């Protein structure tokens, strides 16, 4: 199971977490759907099912068909499997699948960043102009700003692949894990406060299964994955930069709140 030792898990876990990013967007959409009590639980179950089938299932199939010594990085393991079982144009098919996945990820990322900018501006943390919407209800300026940031980040993969791009990927993966830490902590706190106010769990439209152990496991594993990258010298810089970024965000938030209160 671990031909290169268990330590290899630590050096790849952040990149793996980055691949799973986006699952938390379900919570963001709750503010826009007509019936979140029905739609959001259905989306959660569908997402978990797809992750189990397409992510974990495909890994099991690949591991069963390809010896680990032959699973290199020059050719996709999926292409190797499809070619071995005689599927024609395996490389072209996988390129189409990858392109569709990239466009889907870019679309969800653009939606999430636009929604976050609009939300922050609507709460007064960012300039109010970013909260303005057009006649279709779309915050066009926030979306345009998100697109500019995304394109600038994409260019770093060509002009600074071994420096800036690597740091951005590390920071993005770490930021996602930090979001998961906060979500798990908020869920634990929410359930306790809900019951402390005399309410019943039956009043909740959706109850996460396995509470509190699933939330505790998510909190512990997410925090561990943040700390484990200290042992990877290539991603250690991402941890330091993320820490600085968080300090800047909190100082800015404190400054805005203090100015409003004055």
Image (tube, grey):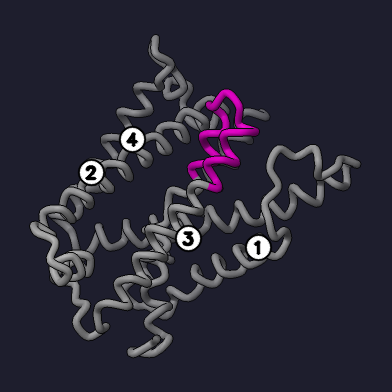
Check if mark 2's residue and mark 4's residue have beta carbons within 8 Å: no
Check disc 3 and report the residue beneath it: 243
Q: Is residue 170 above or below residue 95?
A: below
Q: Quadrant of the N terminus?
A: bottom left
In terms of image quadrants, where is residue 58? bottom left
Kindly report the distance in space between the C-alpha atoms of the residues bearing marks 2 and 3.
Answer: 22 Å
Badge 2 crowding class, 10 Å Cα cut-off, few under 14, some 14 to 19, many 20 or more, is few
Kindly state the secondary structure of the residue where label 2 is placed: helix
Q: Which residues are magenta?
A: 25-45
> In the drawing, what numbered circle is on residue 214?
1
Identify the mark nearer the N-term, 1 or 4.
4
> 217 or 132: nearer the eye?
217
In terms of image quadrants, where is residue 168? bottom left
Q: Residue furthest top?
A: 135
**Residue 215: image location, x then y, percent:** 66, 60
Q: Residue drawn 35% across and 28% down?
A: 143
Kindly report the distance in space between the C-alpha atoms of the residues bearing marks 1 and 4.
Answer: 33 Å
**Residue 234: image location, x then y, percent:** 31, 74
**Residue 221: image location, x then y, percent:** 56, 69
Check disc 2 and report the residue beneath it: 152
């Amino acid at each position: 199971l671990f031909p290169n030792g268990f330590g290899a898990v630590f050096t790849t876990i952040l990149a793996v977490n980055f691949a799973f990013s986006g699952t938390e967007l379900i919570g963001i959409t709750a503010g826009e759907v007509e019936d979140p009590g029905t739609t959001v639980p259905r989306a959660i179950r569908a997402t978990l099912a797809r992750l189990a089938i397409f992510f974990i299932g495909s890994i099991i199939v690949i591991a069963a068909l390809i010896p680990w010594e032959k699973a290199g990085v020059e050719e996709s393991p999926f292409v190797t499997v499809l070619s071995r079982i005689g599927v024609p144009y395996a490389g072209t098919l996988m390129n189409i699948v990858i392109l569709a996945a990239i466009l889907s990820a870019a679309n969800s990322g653009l939606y999430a960043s636009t929604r976050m900018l609009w939300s922050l501006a609507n709460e007064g943390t960012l300039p109010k102009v970013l909260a303005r919407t057009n006649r279709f209800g779309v915050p066009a300026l926030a979306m345009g700003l998100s697109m500019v940031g995304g394109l600038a980040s994409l260019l770093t993969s060509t002009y600074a692949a071994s420096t800036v791009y690597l740091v951005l990927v590390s920071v993005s993966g770490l930021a996602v894990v930090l979001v998961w830490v906060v979500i798990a902590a908020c869920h634990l706190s929410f359930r306790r406060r809900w019951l402390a106010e005399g309410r019943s769990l039956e009043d909740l439209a959706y109850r996460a299964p396995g509470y509190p152990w699933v939330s505790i496991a998510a909190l512990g594993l997410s925090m561990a994955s943040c700390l484990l990258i200290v042992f990877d010298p290539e991603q250690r810089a991402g941890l330091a930069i993320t820490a600085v970024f968080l300090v800047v965000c909190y100082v800015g938030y404190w400054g805005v709140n203090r100015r409003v209160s004055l």
